[in-house]
Amino acid sequence: MTERIFLDTNVLVYADDADARDKRVRAQQRLTAVLTAGAAVVSTQVLQEYYVIATRKLRLPPDVARLRVETLARLDVVVIRPEHVLAAIDLQRLRSLSFWDALVVRAAVAGGCSRLLTEDMNHGEVIEGVRIEDPFRA
């Protein structure tokens, strides 16, 4: 069985960020590896965040950003449900995470992921069985 790897929004954004060359290259390399292995998992939260950041920060035209979201939506997508939100609230309080990071972790758990690629949490930390990996760490 293929290991499942959750992709946080920042990895997807950096893959398209022309102003962050080093991170773009690294994000593209990691994405290629995860996609080739058929291991990629995202959530509806990640799709929403990607669209907002792509159109605001990266200034992609809305049609281009929509096409990217459409492509990402072909991956295994965890649909955020009320029980995920409630579990994220509990996790936020327990682990002192931001609510949004806690929701990403809960989505990774719900998606059966053993790893979470993000720069927003502590590299190497294991939260609810999911190992945090910073793909931009040297």
Image (cartoon, grey):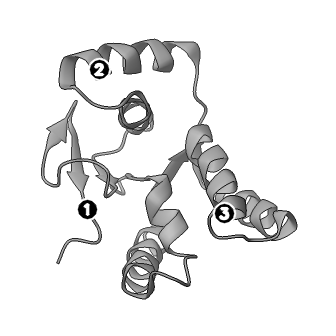
Residue in the picture at 20% in, 17% down? 94
Residue furthest out toward the right: 63
Q: Is residue 35 left or right of residue 74?
A: left
Query: Which element is circle 3 on?
Result: helix
Q: How dense is the environment of label 3, judged by Cα within 10 Å: few (below 14), some, or many (20 and up)?
A: many
Residue 134, which numbered label?
Answer: 1
Give amino acid for label 1: Asp
Give amino acid for label 3: Ala
Q: Is residue 74 visible?
A: no
Residue 87, which numbered label?
Answer: none
Query: Which element is circle 1 on?
Result: loop
Q: Nearer the viewer, mark 3 or mark 1?
A: 3
Above or below for 44 versus 123: above
Q: Nearer the viewer, mark 2 or mark 3?
A: 3
Residue 91, which numbered label?
Answer: 2
Give amino acid for label 2: Leu
Image coordinates of residue 28 in percent, x first then y, are 46, 80
Q: How dense is the environment of label 2, judged by Cα within 10 Å: few (below 14), some, or many (20 and up)?
A: many
Image coordinates of residue 32 in percent, x first then y, are 46, 78
Above or below for 40 versus 111: below
Query: Which element is circle 2 on?
Result: helix
Residue in the picture at 23% in, 50% down? 132
Above or below for 43 versus 63: above
Residue in the picture at 66% in, 63% down? 54
Above or below for 37 versus 133: below
N-terminal label among 3 and 1: 3
N-terminal label among 2 and 3: 3
